Amino acid sequence: MDNIAITKVPLTDAGEFEYEVKAGGAEIKKYNGSETKINIPPEIDGTPVTGIGNTAFLGTEELTYVLIPDGVTSIEGGAFSLCTGLANISIPESVTNIGRSAFLGCKRLAGVNIPGGLISLENGVFSLCASLESVKIPDGVTKINAEAFTGCEGLQSVTIPASVTVIGERAFENCSGLKSVTLPQNLSFIGERAFQNCASLSGAVIPSGVTEINGGTFQECAELASVTLPDGITRIGSGAFTNCVKLTNISIPDSVTNVSSNAFLGCTGLTEAVYKGVKYSAKVNAWRMWDLPEEFYDAVNAEEE
């Protein structure tokens, strides 16, 4: 993020790191020090530091600040997982890979600068970063993998660039503070439960390249009042809009051939669905699994799941 405050701290003693020399440089394997603020050295014993290894700082709870030097190209999986006190980290633009769950559970991390050389955000990379407030994903990222931001309860805004074509399953699940998100026009796939329990999300416009609304995609989005589905959508999966209680009407494109019988389960405010020019009014029957009448599901050849 642009406003991250950079704290000047002395260069950390290179002797506090265990490392392994690999082709092109040194990879830090483990931190043995006790400092709360760390400047990782640009070289150790004359060898440039180019990587932060798997679980190198795992569970270092007292750590509050880390500066990673230019020249580091890779932050491996779980590198800073469960660093529960980590509030600030500076990642250089030289980094082209951040591994899965690299910052999982960094619950005090309020902001992060994502380098522009990344192609994808890996599984669980910022999962459970409950204090993360806003994220700008750089141009060039094509995929937001599964659970990348799951449980980021404080996340209020996210900028997704036009380069992103895939949002993986549960990518933004339980981001309860997320009020709005603009999905890029090149997006072609949204995974199951991608926005489940985004309780503050008020609306969604699905891009034209997306052909399915997968199971649970917007489940428990209690504030969701507006959804725009494009021509080309063929299926609305099980529980896709379960308990979206503020959703009052939905227009189903003619291209849809399958709507799961519980796609709109618990949408108690839903009064009308339009499909192929026919308006279907919801019926209130507590014993039924869905809020729309059976003839609607018959019309789109729905199969119960």
Image (cartoon, rainbow, N blue to C red):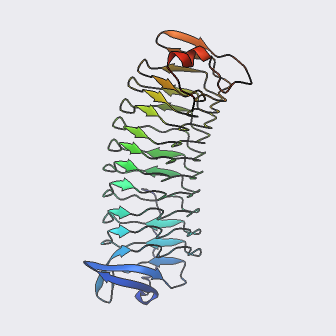
Using the image as rendered, state which of residue 174 and residue 10 is in the foreground: 174
Q: Residue at x 54, y 17 (%)?
A: 298
The relative height of residue 115 versus residue 53 in the rendered view (above or below) is above
Please provide percent x and percent y for residue 10. Answer: 44, 82
User: Where the N terminus falls, by quadrant?
Assistant: bottom left
Which residue sits furthest right? 286
Can residue 42 be seen from the camera position used here?
no
Q: Which residue reaches farthest left?
A: 24
The image quarter containing residue 221 is top right
Instruction: List x then y, in percent, for residue 15.
Output: 43, 90
The residue at the point 48 percent across, 68 percent down is 78
Establish if 7 lies above or below 14: above
Task: Locate residue 95: give its quadrant.
Answer: bottom left
User: Percent position (x, y) of residue 88?
Assistant: 50, 66
Image side of residue 46 versus residue 226, left or right: left
Residue at position x 35%, y 32% in the image: 209
Image quadrant holding the C terminus, namely top right
Residue at the top extreme of this rendering: 278
**In the rendered image, the vertical position of residue 288 relative to residue 27, given as above or below:** above
Q: Position of residue 246 (x, y in %)?
A: 64, 27
- Count of marks placed on residues: 0
Q: Is residue 292 above or below residue 136?
A: above
Tell me the residue at 51%/27% (across/down).
227
**Residue 283 visible in the snapshot:** yes
